Image (cartoon, rainbow, N blue to C red):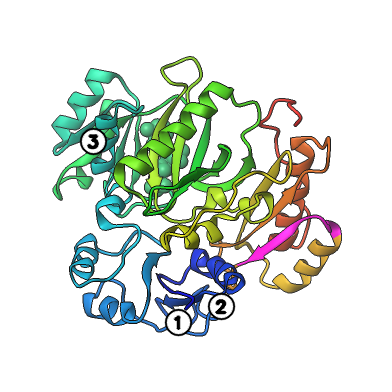
Amino acid sequence: MFPVIGVVGGGQLARMMAPEALNLGFELRILAEGPDVSAARSVASAPVGDYTDLATLREFARGVDVLTFDHEHVPNEHLQALIAEGVNVQPRPAALIHAQDKLVMREAIAALGLPNPEWAAVETVDELVAFGQKIGWPIVLKTPRGGYDGKGVRMIETEEDARAAADWFGNGALLAEDKVAFTRELSALVARNPGGEAKAWPVVHTIQVDGVCDEVIAPAPGLDPAVEAAAEQAALRIAEAFGVTGVMAAELFETPGSGAGFVINELAMRPHNTGHWTMNGSITSQFEQHLRAVLDLPLGATDALAETTVMKNYLGGANQDLFTAFQAALAAEPRVKVHAYGKSVRPGRKIGHVNVVSEPGESVDSLRARANTVASLIRDGVPSPAPASTTEGQTS
Ligand code: ADP
């Protein structure tokens, strides 16, 4: 009998698992937040229900072989209750907590001896000021739980800023960190199954705009092989030590010439935006791998299919007539693969992404230009100027 997978949450991540489940012959069911969410029409069974309600989760879990997630917001205690009742939850709540609570994550990474920025748990403005005075300004203040896309992150440049952050205090400890002078952001993506088999994809360069992942270059151009190996090993070690199952992304800051050459920013335990390139750029996509991993099946090969793959998100803009623009985009770049999320257009909302894999000898800048052209055509109906080079003339 082929298994049934239940996914809590109906965003684009659940939606992109659907074709992979279909290809593998598995049934995917989705607990949707509403009838119109991105994944709702991608599977035959997508009941609408509140993922913060234990009875709803229990009902949804009935008849599925494994329960997994599109996001990390399901209350950890509900998952513990489901496990006590015999539900197969993957990843386990004891692992997931490290993606739900940044203070728990910092402590656990420190215990493993892996590279953290300097950090402290602070409960008052005075403790925040003392931390800033000790390590030097600027610093960063974060809410341990519930942040996403840069919400819940506050840059504290001076002692005055720290004093002005009083409004964030009063609900338990916050995370204060050194503001890392990184050269770029990287992501190390791995998958692990409950039996302990684990595999890593190449470490990628992720370009954020306004705290949101905008573009990914896979692999990260010019990355020191020693740093690449250390980053991959760190992600695999975390997955093993925390008992992670499914896909996990370790978001990293590259810090050449200091320490290991990187520090860990945060963890995600689900397919991740920095892994969307694998849909066209790797033998096994992160969505297929996630399904295999949570079902404790053998994992697929993670080799890259081309020298370089570029992923570019497109957000909602002023253009509402996406389909006319879409046709122009397809015509402009036959080698670019478009992945649309079936969402209505709202400014700033992630509504799709494009992937493009390199032709032999093609430069990273050329690839990025092509991905950007298509993404802008879809978003705005007109092509954008070429992106500024972040690769400093390196070609792949
Ligand atoms: P979220 O959980 O909202 O994604 P992150 O912790 O990833 O929040 O922070 C969002 C962005 O803020 C990061 O991508 C990075 O650009 C910046 N940032 C976060 N922490 C630090 C830090 N310690 N030093 C420098 N920049 C940081």
Residue drawn at x 51%, y 40% as measured from the top left = 187
Q: Magenta part of the protein: which range?
A: 332-340
Marks 1 and 2 close (CB-CB < 8 Å): yes
Amino acid of disc 3: Glu
Q: Which residue is mark 2?
A: 42
Amino acid of disc 2: Ser
First in sequence: mark 3 vs mark 2: 2
Residue lying furthest front in this view? 1
SS category of the residue bearing label 1? loop
First in sequence: mark 1 vs mark 3: 1
Q: Quadrant of ligand 1?
A: top left
Give the x, y percent position of residue 60: 33, 80
Residue drawn at x 48%, y 56% as measured from the top left = 271
Residue drawn at x 54%, y 29% as measured from the top left = 228
Crowd band around label 3 with a 10 angstrom C-alpha radius: few (<14), some (14–19), many (20+): some
Amino acid of disc 1: Ala
Q: Is mark 3 within 8 Å of ligand 1?
A: no
Q: Which residue is mark 1?
A: 46
Crowd band around label 2 with a 10 angstrom C-alpha radius: few (<14), some (14–19), many (20+): many
Give the x, y percent position of residue 214: 58, 48
Q: Which residue is mark 3?
A: 107
Left or right for 246, reference 371: left
Marks 1 and 3 close (CB-CB < 8 Å): no
Tell me the quarter of the image containing the C terminus: top right
Residue 146 vertical position relative to residue 229 in the rendered view, above or below? below
Crowd band around label 1 with a 10 angstrom C-alpha radius: few (<14), some (14–19), many (20+): many
